[in-house]
Image: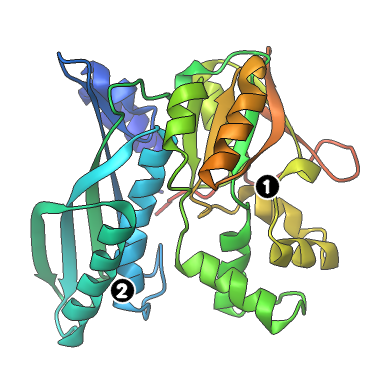
Amino acid sequence: MFDEDDFIRRCLRPLAAVPGSAGLTDDAAVIDFPAGESIVVTTDMIVSGVHFPRDEKPALVAARALRVNVSDLVAKGADPLGYLLQISVPAGTGDGFGDDFAAGLSADHTRYGLKLYGGDTAVVPEVAPLGVAVTMFGSTRGERAPRRSGACPGDVVFVSGDIGDAALGLMVARGDPFPDIGAGHLDYLEAAYRLPRPPFGLQGAIRKHARAAMDISDGLVGDLARLCQTSGVSARIRAEKVPLSAAAKAACDSDPRLMKLVLTGGDDYQSMVIVPVDQSISFARDCMTSGFPVKAIGTCGDGPPEVVAIGMDGQPMSFARTRYTHRG
């Protein structure tokens, strides 16, 4: 079967020889200019039936396409500037699609200060899925962009926002068996899955304090393992420290097995930030001031580049898989 990680490692990484690409080990490229400015470039593709429901509202598809890229830039401490848009639309799509899709883009232009610089459109066979790809550019305002590779033993692992809402929300959206936690909580979780909420506003604190950072898109444990691999450190986190929304907490209290999904399910689009211990208090304070509080969930250490997650019972957790992966 097609393996995304193997394809990147064996086939694409040898072609990415320029310094800004970081050997394709990061979520974004950082292009340094002579004047000291760095432009951060990221790209993500979303496809119906894979990343969002086939019957999703066009405005929500547009917002998701932009926000998964904003999430990458925020984790690099970069302020979004603009983007290129590529979209493949199945033949037979209704006339109202374009207006609704553009409305979704326009709302997030205002929210994130974005501009559309160009792109491409294509009409594909009716049986093909809707696909949207965005290439987004951001600026670090002359400061450095933290990579995945900067973490050191003793550093503190922080995460923004709440973790697990989207993974639980996908269960709700699919109609999977789920605890009866009340209509309000169920609606909240499903909305979190359908519309990512990246922590836009943390960029300054990340630029100032982060030793390493990345966005959490494929699952907290798995993405932290990626960062550890690139930095050559281990990490130890505690499930009880992971921030949960009231809805996610209600679900996990009702069925403690769901905590594994919270830690590995993906679609969080929050920031994971690795900070030196002597800056951890000031980092948390700066984030609180920005309106996006963060929480320390563990530390980095020596040893093999792996993640140990300690469960609510005080014992190391085991996972069938640690993150979402694309496989054919």
User: What's the coloring here?
Assistant: rainbow
Give the number of the disc on residue 320: 1
* Tag in front: 2 or 1: 2
**Is residue 237 depicted above or below 111 in this figure?**
above
Give the number of the disc on residue 272: none
Task: Determine if residue 14 is in view.
Answer: no
Rendering coords of residue 294 (x, y %): 62, 40
Residue that badge 2 annotates: 59
Q: Amino acid at mark 2?
A: Ala
Please report the residue visible at 43 percent of the width from the left and 26 percent of the height from the top: 207
Depth check: 6 or 243 in front? 243
Quadrant where the image shows the C terminus: bottom left
Depth check: 278 or 297 in front? 278
Residue at the far front: name it.
289
Please report the residue visible at 37 percent of the width from the left and 77 percent of the height from the top: 56
**Relative side of 227 to 258, left or right:** left
Alpha-carbon span between mark 2 and mark 1? 35 Å
Please report the residue visible at 39 percent of the width from the left and 30 percent of the height from the top: 26
Disc 1, SS: loop
Depth check: 5 or 131 in front? 131
Please report the residue visible at 41 percent of the width from the left and 62 percent of the height from the top: 51
Rendering coords of residue 60 (x, y %): 36, 71
Task: Determine if residue 12 is in view.
Answer: yes
Q: Quadrant of residue 90?
A: bottom left
**Is residue 285 depicted above or below 152 in this figure?**
below
**Relative side of 200 to 43, left or right:** right
Q: Residues within 10 Å of mark 1 (few under 14, many from 20)?
A: few
Disc 2, SS: helix
The total of numbered circles placed on residues is: 2
Rendering coords of residue 318 (x, y %): 76, 41
**Relative side of 174 to 91, left or right:** right
